[in-house]
Image (cartoon, helix red, strand yellow):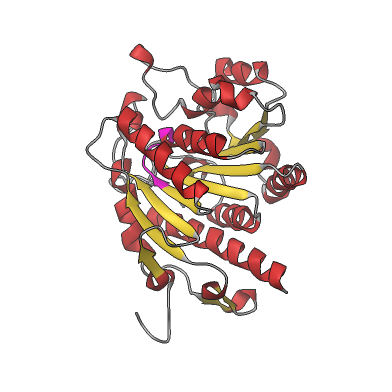
């Protein structure tokens, strides 16, 4: 620790004691099954290395907002790395549901995007409220399962939409956000349309000039319904000039600033109970992408601290 420049990494402790708990999902078998470029299993540990010197703990830009006054952060470690993918999914779901039951905010760093169904399922099993699941992604991720019903990085939200628990509450919603038509099969679009009114797509072309306004509108609608919210952020929705270290880089997409702002507003909504980040692949590019991923986490934390401070004033 540098006494005159305390950073986020300086206040993170090990274990589950934090109000926000980091969990790593070090698996990219789902990416391999989906014919993607592997390497995302190294994402959680690379993220931790770069997190050490990310973000000031006292942010003068937000009226000297001191994170330590409003929240705590701990690192709950990784899901065991020597399991089958199916076993890892089950362990992840159990782990996240346990944290939610203990009043924690899990922030899960992958790893492949297949982590998002176990995360969503954990919230479904935990809450008695309706839920909003927001998938920030260039892709829809509603592909059919592979042979022998094997899940993969392109199937998490088909699994969610086929889960009978999700249909038990008619107020549940699944939102696709920043989807790119050039990346999304019409068959998958029609699948989502067939699930209306549970589903909605916000195409990238319709929100690219100002994605924050519709994102905040979605959060507000969920808050008005007193729904619990899960924000799933696949970083391949961010333009590759800022975020090259992913399996499927985006030639066009969200800017780095927009990604950080989205995370800030997600953190600021106290109804957001869970967030995950997927597809950081440090074998493709580690530093620029890794710094952005840690900054996204920092902005989520910053938003949550500001929301709590605002409540207390």
Q: Residue at x 42, y 54 (%)?
A: 22
x, y percent for residue 183: 52, 28
Furthest residue toward top: 147
x, y percent for residue 106: 48, 51
Say whether residue 239 is visible. Answer: no
Q: What's drawn in magenta, residue-wise?
A: 109-114
Left or right of residue 278, residue 225 in this image:
right
Residue 42, compared with residue 18, is above or below; it is above
Quarter of the image that includes the N terminus: bottom left
Say whether residue 25 is visible. Answer: yes
Q: Residue at x 60, y 27 (%)?
A: 166
Left or right of residue 123, residue 249 in this image:
left
x, y percent for residue 219: 70, 46
Of 122 and 198, the residue lying toward us: 122
Left or right of residue 302, residue 242 in this image:
left
In this figure, what is the number of numbered marks? 0
Furthest residue toward right: 224
Q: Residue at x 71, y 67 (%)?
A: 311
Q: Quadrant of residue 147?
A: top left
Residue 8, compared with residue 158, is above or below; it is below
Furthest residue toward bottom: 4
Q: Is residue 155 magenta?
A: no
Left or right of residue 227, residue 232 in this image:
left
Of 40 and 219, the residue lying toward us: 219
Quarter of the image that includes the C terminus: bottom right
């Amino acid at each position: 620790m540098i006494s005159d420049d305390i950073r986020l990494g300086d206040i993170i402790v090990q274990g589950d004691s934090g109000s926000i708990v980091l969990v790593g999902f070090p698996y990219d078998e789902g990416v391999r099954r989906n014919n993607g470029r592997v390497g995302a299993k190294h994402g959680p540990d690379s993220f931790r290395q770069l997190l050490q010197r990310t973000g000031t703990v006292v942010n003068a830009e937000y009226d000297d907002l001191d994170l330590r006054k409003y929240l705590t952060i701990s690192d709950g470690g990784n899901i065991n790395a020597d399991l089958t993918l199916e076993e890892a999914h089950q362990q992840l779901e159990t782990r996240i549901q346990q944290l939610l039951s203990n009043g924690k905010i899990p922030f899960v760093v992958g790893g492949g995007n297949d982590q998002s169904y176990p995360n969503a399922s954990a919230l479904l099993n935990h809450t008695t409220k309706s839920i909003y699941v927001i998938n920030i992604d260039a892709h829809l991720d509603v592909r059919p399962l592979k042979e022998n019903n094997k899940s993969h990085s392109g199937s998490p939200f088909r699994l969610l939409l086929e889960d009978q628990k999700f249909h038990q509450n008619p107020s549940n919603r699944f939102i696709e956000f920043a989807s790119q038509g050039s990346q999304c099969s019409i068959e998958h679009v029609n699948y989502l349309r067939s699930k209306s009114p549970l589903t909605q797509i916000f195409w990238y072309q319709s929100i690219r000039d100002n994605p924050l306004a519709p994102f905040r509108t979605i959060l507000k609608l969920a808050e008005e319904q007193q729904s619990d919210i899960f924000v799933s952020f696949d970083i391949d929705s961010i333009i590759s000039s800022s975020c090259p270290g992913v399996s499927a880089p985006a030639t066009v997409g969200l800017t780095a600033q927009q990604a950080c702002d989205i995370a800030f507003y997600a953190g600021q909504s106290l109804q957001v109970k869970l967030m995950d980040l997927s597809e950081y692949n440090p074998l493709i590019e580690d530093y620029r992408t890794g710094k952005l991923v840690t900054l996204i986490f920092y902005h989520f934390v910053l938003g949550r601290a500001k929301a709590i401070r605002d409540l207390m004033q």
